[in-house]
Amino acid sequence: MANILVVEDDKDLNAAYKIILESAKHHVKTAFNGLEALEILKTYTPDLILLDLLMPVMGGLELLEKYRLKNHPDVQVLIFTNMENSPEVSKAYALGATRCIIKSWTAPQNLNKVVNDTLKETSKVAG
């Protein structure tokens, strides 16, 4: 079980991700933009952030810049976007993102596998 923060502006996807992840016994908090996520991160330390890049108010890249992952090396960031091979994805990696998954290529029923694989891969690197 992991602590996961879902940051996704699409209300249906946000709710679906939360339900799917909680069905696998993960503890999940959600935000609809980067500003909400920053508020949550003041009191919540996730193992993984599932992050959309394009959102109103504050997007994923700005959240990564403000959160400063270098100060939180144990927090893994899984970018969930439809922008394949974009400069934004490259910048997300430069800011500390662990992995990028293309939303349209990942069926919702596979979300737990993607999350668990990401957590396992990073624990092998850390361990």
Image: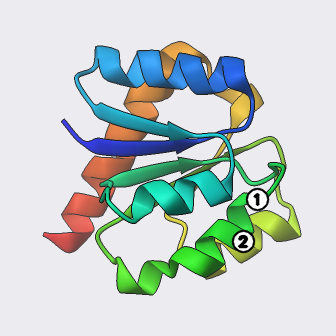
Mark 1: amino acid = Gly
Q: Nearer the viewer, residue 97 or 125?
A: 97
Assess disc 2: are there few (<14), some (14-19) or many (≥20) residues with their C-alpha within 10 Å of its C-alpha.
some
Which residue is painted at 50% across and 37% down in the image?
A: 30
Position of 51 compared to 120: left or right?
right
Mark 2: amino acid = Glu
Name the image quarter holding residue 20.
top left
Q: Which mark is residue 59?
A: 1
Q: Position of residue 86 (x, y in %)?
A: 86, 62
Residue denoted by label 2: 62
Q: Position of residue 33 (x, y in %)?
A: 69, 49
Q: Nearer the viewer, residue 101 or 13?
A: 13
Element carrying mark 1 = loop
Q: Quadrant of the C terminus?
A: bottom left
Which residue is painted at 81% across and 55% down in the image?
A: 57
Name the image quarter holding residue 15.
top right
Circles 1, 2 touching at the beta carbon (< 8 Å): yes
> Above or below — where is 56 with respect to 59?
above
What's the CA distance linking mark 1 and mark 2? Answer: 6 Å
Position of 70 compared to 24: left or right?
right
> Above or below — where is 36 with respect to 93?
above
| Visual colour scheme | rainbow
